[in-house]
Every structure is written in structure tokens, then in C-alpha cells.
Amino acid sequence: MLKEKAEQVVTELAQKIISSIGPSKLVVGLSGGADSTLVLLIAKKVTELDPRYSALAVHCIHGLDADDPVWFKHCHKLCESVGVEIRTPKLNIVYGNGRSPEEVSRAERYRALLDNLDEHSALLLGHQADDQIESFLLALKRGSGPYGLSGMRFMVHDDRGTLIRPLLELHKSEIIDIIETLGFSHVFDISNTYMKFERNFIRLKVLPLLRERFPGIDKSIIRSSKLCAHEHDLAMRYAREAYERAFDRQRLRLDITKLDVSDEPLMLSVLRLFLYEKLIMTPEYNAVMDALNLCRISPDQSTVIPLEEGYEVRRFRNFLYIVRPSVCNAHGQYELNAGKTLRIDDYLYSLESCEDGFACDRVVLDFEFTGSMKLHPKKRGHSREIKKLFTEYSVPAWERNSICLVRAKGTDNVVGFGDLFITREGALENSSSQRFCLKIERA
């Protein structure tokens, strides 16, 4: 390849990014391989074409390979020669309990990369055309539907932020040709030859046979992938309307009563949208079906559907929740003053100013109570047992150990119950004083 042609490809892809997003910090997921090296060169070219953009490389240290120092040194040298800042977070990879090292590494790597994003940034990744083809075959092996078969998009904008994959129209051989023509080298990851990894088996064993027998197989797979993407997008437009009617964003739950659980195609699409609220990777079909079955049966608080990245799907009454298991081993009483934050295991407690609260800037959080104890919410005409109030206020069983009585310091008066309500006693206090309420957050 001529140098002029290689430079033209880099410039055209840089201009495509500029035309797709406004001035941003471009965060490059840099491994040191050929793909991510070309992405780094494209990001640098963007900053040269428009100084309002900036570039940052992030090289994740997995700590699982003896060659980690080789990759680290190479990436530092590469970024120094190009003139791009580099960060090197160390991943905490703990696998087991059914999660493979590859799965955990992928999730932790994404998390580390996304930690470097803000509202004015985009994550650039090095996935290319060969990755698309391999992903299609892997998704086919797993029995994926249109979304899994649709492959990756040039740009995705969701709750994670903006993700851009500029190399999806280039094959690995073309990428290597471009960077070598421009005078750059790359490190070869020997793990790409390990046949124990499914993707490597597809790449090294399956695809060569398919290409020998069907020379046009690459183009056919990419075309099928695009058609699946179109079908999926059309289905999601219809499903999103139903999803928005049932989704409670504040409490991250789905109201089952607002959905027709007998409509399996629609429900599967709605549940995928629900799981995407927290998951980075595509949820497994079995997990989606388990969630659908949980919607169909009578409420069962003990059923847990494990997901990737430490999340779970649970049901309480007529709501489906995505939760991350939490710990709150609080016992006895804890003092809390306005302006301070108290941490108990996985929860943070603080007093926040609010017009409709209690007039106490110093309180005691009391975790020693029984379900038969009665409280009188200020908006109720009479008192009621705590165990019934939990149900009335839709507090799932797995969150109840974080809820406490809020007592005015120096008295036995209960002025509130967790962050659920102010009691009648709390509402009757001096109305001229500044008023507060308890706020409970996950740490």
C-alpha cells in the first residue's frame, strides 16, 4: 500500500468521527495490537484536523499474562511517539462461580474504559470487519436472535456514553498494511492462538474452511448481519413504547401489570431493554426467558436470576427489579447530624433539607425494631404495623435491612422511617425550624 493511500484512509475515518460527534475527548481503548494502534492514529488525526478535540489512550493491565510488561512498555512508547496521553489502570479480575476469566476480563476492561468518559467524551474501540464475522458465528452458535446477529455499529449512544468503532469496514490484513505503511509496529498477542477460546477456534479453524468452500462468505455474513440489525431496530421501536409505559426509572423496576405477559415476542424485547439498563454485554437468551417466566408466575421473592457483572433479577409483588446484592449488618443505634454522612456497609445515610420533613438536625438511626411495631405515617389516618408498611410502600425483602427508625436525638420520638415517610410525630414539630429527611443511598 502506498503511504498516500494509508494516510487517506486515516484522514477519511477521522473526518467521519468529526462529522458524527461534536468536539469531544476521544478515549482510545489501547491494547497495543494492530487494530487499537490504528484507532489511536485516527484519534490523533482528529485532533490535528480540529484542535477542539483531544485524545487519551487507556491501556488496561489485566494481570493474567506474563507478557503484560511487554504490552505496557510498547503502549507507552507508542503514545509517546504519537503525542497522546496514556493511562494504565490495573484491573481487579476475580473469576469463578460460573464466570470465566475471559468474561470477567471483558466486563472489567469495559468498566475501566468507561470510567474515563464524561458527557463530552467518546470511547473509541478497535473492532473490525473480521470481528464482525466472528461475532456473527459465535452468536449463531449461542442461538441469538436478530440483535445478537446484528453485530456492532459504527456509533452507539446509550447510558454508558458514546461508543465509536471506526474500523468496522476494514479487515485485519488491511489494518496491518496501513499501520506498517505509516511506520508503526504492533505487538502480537499470543493468546490469540489459544484454541481453548471459542473466538480463536472460529477464526483459525472454522472460517478458513468456510472461505475455502464459499469464497464470498465474508460479504454474505456482513450483509446478513446488517439485515438483522434493521429487523432488530424496527422491533425495538415498537417494543420501546410498551417498555416506557412499564419502566420506573427512579427505582429501576418494571411494572408487570402494564405488560401483556402472554405476548412472548414483545415481552422478550421489553425484557432485553430492561436488562440493558445495567448490562454492558448482550444478555443471554436463557436469562431473558427466566425473567419472562418470573413475570408469568405468582410473586416469588426468593427467586434470583443471576446476570453478568454481579447483577440479579428479582421479583417483588408485581414488579421486576435489577439489583446488585448488598450488605447492611447494622445493629443498635447510630447518631447522625445534618451535613454529615454515615456509612454502614454498602449504604450511605445523610440528612437532607426538605420542606416536608421533620425539624431535627440531629437524629438517631435505630435498627432495633420488630415487624409488629406500629408507626403512624403523617399522610395516613391511623398507625399500622411495620411489616404491613413495608408492603404498602413496596419495599422488597432484600432492601428492608437497610431501613431504620429515625428518632429525634435525646428523645424516644420516632420522626421518620428510613427514607420512606415522615411520621405524624415528626410532622407536628416546630414548623418554623429548618426541616430535614433521611436520605439512603447505595455506596
Image: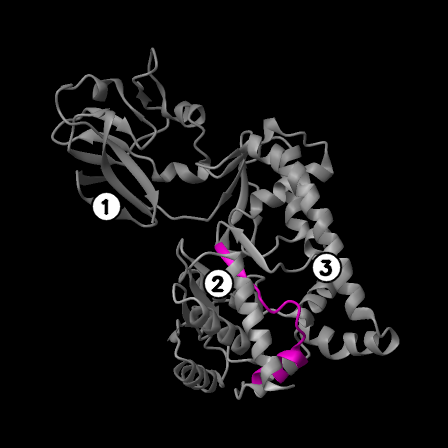
Look at 61% across and 38% down and name the residue there. 240
Q: Secondary structure at mark 1?
A: strand
Camera-side mark, 3 or 2: 2
Q: Quadrant of residue 381?
A: top left
Q: Is residue 25 above or below residue 240?
A: below
Report if residue 308 is visible in the image: yes
Query: Which span is picked out in magenta?
Result: 161-179
Q: CA distance from mark 1 to mark 3?
A: 46 Å
Q: Return the disc, 1 or 2, that comes first in the chain's sequence.
A: 2
The residue tagged with tag 2: helix, strand or loop? strand
Query: Disc 1 to disc 2, how far (Cα)?
Result: 35 Å
Tell which circle, 1 or 3, labels the residue nearer the N-terminal end. Answer: 3
Q: Is residue 307 above or below residue 217?
A: above
Residue type at mark 3 is Arg
Image location of residue 256, percent across then percent down: 59, 31
Is residue 44 rendered to the left or right of residue 290?
Answer: left
Q: Is residue 425 left or right of residue 141?
A: left
Name the residue beneath numbered marker 3. 142
Tag on residue 18?
Answer: none
Residue 331 seen: no
**Residue bearing mark 1:** 342
* Marks 1 and 3 in Cβ contact (< 8 Å): no
Tell me which amino acid carries mark 1: Leu
- Provide the secondary structure element on which disc 3 rests: helix
Which residue is denoted by mark 2 in the rendering?
Answer: 123
Where 384 falls versus 218 (above or below)? Answer: above
